[in-house]
Amino acid sequence: MKIAIVGTGYVGLVTGTCFAEMGTEVFCVDVNTEKIENLKKGIIPIYEPGLEDMVHRNQQAGRLQFTTDLTECLDEVEVLFSAVGTPPDEDGSADLKYVLEVARTVGRNMKKHILVVTKSTVPVGTAKKVRRAIQEELDKRGVEIEFDVASNPEFLKEGAAISDFMSPDRVVVGVESERAEELMTRLYRPFLLNNFRVIFMDVPSAEMTKYAANAMLATRISFMNDIANLCEIIGADVNMVRKGIGSDNRIGNRFLYAGIGYGGSCFPKDVKALINTAKQNNYPMRILQAVEEVNDEQKSLLFHKLEKHFNGDLKGKRIAIWGLAFKPETDDMREAPSLVLIEKLLAAGCEVYAYDPVAVEESKRRIGDVIHYAKDIYDAVVDADALMLVTEWKEFRMPSWSAIKKLMATPLVLDGRNIYDIKEMEENGFIYHCIGR
Ligand code: UDX
């Protein structure tokens, strides 16, 4: 089978590469010439463990090709995935201009049946708009060609994208015809050979599933952050509470970690978009409004703890930050709590020395040299008045505390991810603050 994936962002590139790995012939299409030229040379625009090797392998095997010209491959493919961006509008709703542009290009150029699958996270009702956009172009041409639209939301996590895609918990597909269902079944069968879990449903339900999943996960996080803040006030330990409730099968033990708020390209954007869809339909999403509010406040929590420790006097303080990426195993800083923290620290007159194993280049691109970049965890803490742990990278888990204590000006650690043991930190001579313990 031959397929095209339009949009070589995170989802598009991973999707295309993983389908190729399973033997499908894939054309990855993007309007960004520089990106495509780089990809042709095997230069990957994102950091994602395992992706680079897989791209190279499939390129060499001839199963994975990159192009800027969608019309070039349109006649050859049976299925086209649209994985272009849906950035938030001024009001937070998803902007569909790229999604609809792909649809119009398909309508203007298709010569035979094609299944157009939307992979981007899009509001309920988008598939209808895609269908209409294609049909309008066909009408303009005065031709009648059959086509199908489908919705196939993506659930992969950055940093674990390859394994999430290769062995998904489930694949959700919204279809309107048997032909589309048959094509999608053929395409996904290799991924789910032993445990076939493609859940077919109507298109609006598939579109809604993606938002509901992300909103539910974001809700768990904000809920746990709320519980953590209360634990702190009344003298309970959120880690214990997490273990206590997570062992209930109905609750489950994942996505219950309190911290300094969720970031990334999905949760913040999708929560906003769902609130907006609801508002447009005169239904207030009260829970999600609170989820967003808690998350916004949580991102400032570590700063407030620092401010409290120094009685509001932060001018001239030297602060070490470990971790800039919104989570480990990625260089992505979209909506990262580190950005909120850095802004507040700088506004308060602090000097910031940050270290991240992969996100330094990305940080320089975003905020430039307003902060200093350290070469490793120890370099970051030299003469520091406080160390703030923002991203729970593995290499931060077992540092030499005796070396760090000697390097720091004040032995103060603020842990935004609860990765250290309170007793051990105190035994090592640190003043240690964490979240909800
Ligand atoms: C998420 C969804 O998990 C994925 O299914 C969807 O396709 C895209 O959005 P991603 O944004 O890559 O994936 O990251 P994820 O690992 O889900 O983490 C999101 C944010 O939540 C991070 O900022 C993380 O630090 C935070 N988080 C996660 C917590 O604060 N506590 C937790 O228990 C889990």
Image (cartoon, rainbow, N blue to C red):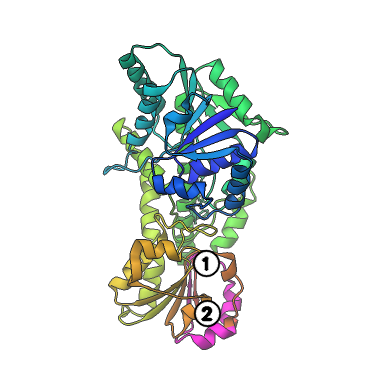
Q: Which mark is residue 357?
A: 1
| Numbered range of the magenta stretch | 402-426
Q: Residue at position x 44%, y 18% from top? A: 111
Residue 250 shows in this picture? no
Where 160 sits versus 17, above or below?
A: below
Label 1 secondary element: loop
Q: Nearer the viewer, residue 223 or 3?
A: 3
Queried whether the magenta region covers residue 122, the answer comes back as: no
Q: Is residue 363 left or right of residue 411?
A: left
Q: What residue is at 57 percent from the left and 78 percent from the top?
A: 425
Q: Along the horizontal axis of the image, is 304 left or right of 408?
A: left
Residue 421 magenta-drawn? yes
Q: Position of residue 358 (x, y in %)?
A: 50, 63
Is the distance from the Cβ of mark 1 to the nearest ligand 1 atom less than 8 Å?
Answer: no
Query: Is the Cβ of the residue at disc 1 closer than 8 Å to that at disc 2?
Result: no
| Circle 2 SS class | helix
Which residue is rendered at x = 52% and y = 75% of the image? Answer: 376
Q: Is residue 382 placed above or below 302 in the rendered structure?
A: below
What amino acid is found at the position of numbered circle 1 in the picture?
Pro
Q: Amino acid at mark 2?
A: Tyr
Q: What's the mark number on residue 378?
A: 2
Rounded to the nearest angstrom, the CA distance separating label 1 from label 2 is 13 Å
Q: Label 1: few (<14), some or many (≥20) within 10 Å?
A: many
Given residues 173 and 148, the one toward you in this image is: 148
Instruction: Give the quadrant of the N terminus.
Output: top right
Left or right of residue 358, residue 362 in this image:
left
Of labels 1 and 2, the one closer to you = 1
Query: In the figure, is residue 312 to the left or right of 413?
Result: left
How many residues crowd around disc 2 within 10 Å: few (fewer than 14), some, or many (20 or more)? some
